[in-house]
Amino acid sequence: MPPSAGRAVCAGDGKDCEHRLTWIKPSFLWMMYRCGWGAKAGQETVLTVEITRDGFEWALRHACLSSYVRGVHPDRATRQRQLKHAPTRIQWDPERDLRLQALPYRSPQLGLAGEAVRRYADEWTVTISDVTPLARPPDITRAQGDLLAHALGTWPAA
């Protein structure tokens, strides 16, 4: 994958890639919630970005929780300093069902900044695919196997 393609995905035009937060959202249905099944203005095209497993694991190893958690962080100020310097932040948002209703469990999202965004754009991006046809409100009575396979896709075992 040419580095310019990864940069274009992370920053729109690819020019200011390392100076903004770019999010990895592994959940297809959560993405459908965010873009309204591809119907929200400016979000009509839906892309999937495949990244290397090594890149994803690097992001996890260098992540800081986006929210303060008592017992995990010594205090709020320490967590704030960690977050400021971490190249990756992780947060957990409610998973969604096919009707985009919140489920009782959460999915991870990784916010990339600085070095992590550069690595994402220049090293980790393997493929970029247009999945806009899958991003249409599903007719619950139609065959949903392909949609669910996309939504429930998993990482191959290491």
Image: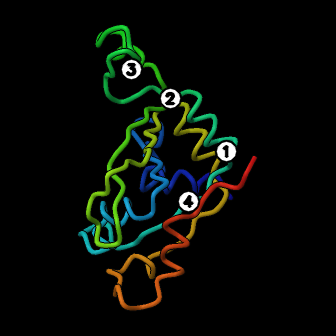
User: Which residue is nearer to you in this view: 104 or 151?
Assistant: 104
Q: Which residue is mark 1?
A: 123
Label 1 sits on a secondary structure element that is: helix
Q: Residue at x 29, y 66 (%)?
A: 100
Q: Which residue is mark 3?
A: 84
Q: Where on the picture, by quarter, is residue 149?
A: bottom right
Q: Which residue is mark 2?
A: 63
Instruction: Look at the picture and state if 62 lies above or below 136.
Output: above
Label 4 sits on a secondary structure element that is: strand
Instruction: Look at the picture and state if 147 lies above or below 23.
Output: below
Q: Position of residue 10 (x, y in %)?
A: 47, 50
Label 2 sits on a secondary structure element that is: strand
CA distance for labels 1 and 2: 18 Å
Q: Residue at x 68, y 47 (%)?
A: 53
Q: Which residue is mark 4?
A: 49
Q: Amino acid at mark 3?
A: Lys
Q: Residue at x 70, y 55 (%)?
A: 156
Quarter of the N terminus within the rendering: bottom right
Instruction: Look at the picture and state if 144 lies above or below 124.
Output: below
If you read the primary sequence from the N terminus, does the residue marked by circle 3 or circle 4 appear first? Answer: 4
Q: Disc 3 vs disc 2: Cβ atoms closer than 8 Å? A: no
What is the crowding at mark 4: few (fewer than 14 residues within 10 Å), some, or many (at least 20)?
A: some
If you read the primary sequence from the N terminus, does the residue marked by circle 4 or circle 1 appear first? Answer: 4
CA distance for labels 3 and 2: 11 Å
Q: Amino acid at mark 4?
A: Val
CA distance for labels 4 and 1: 13 Å
Q: Position of residue 95 (x, y in %)?
A: 36, 55
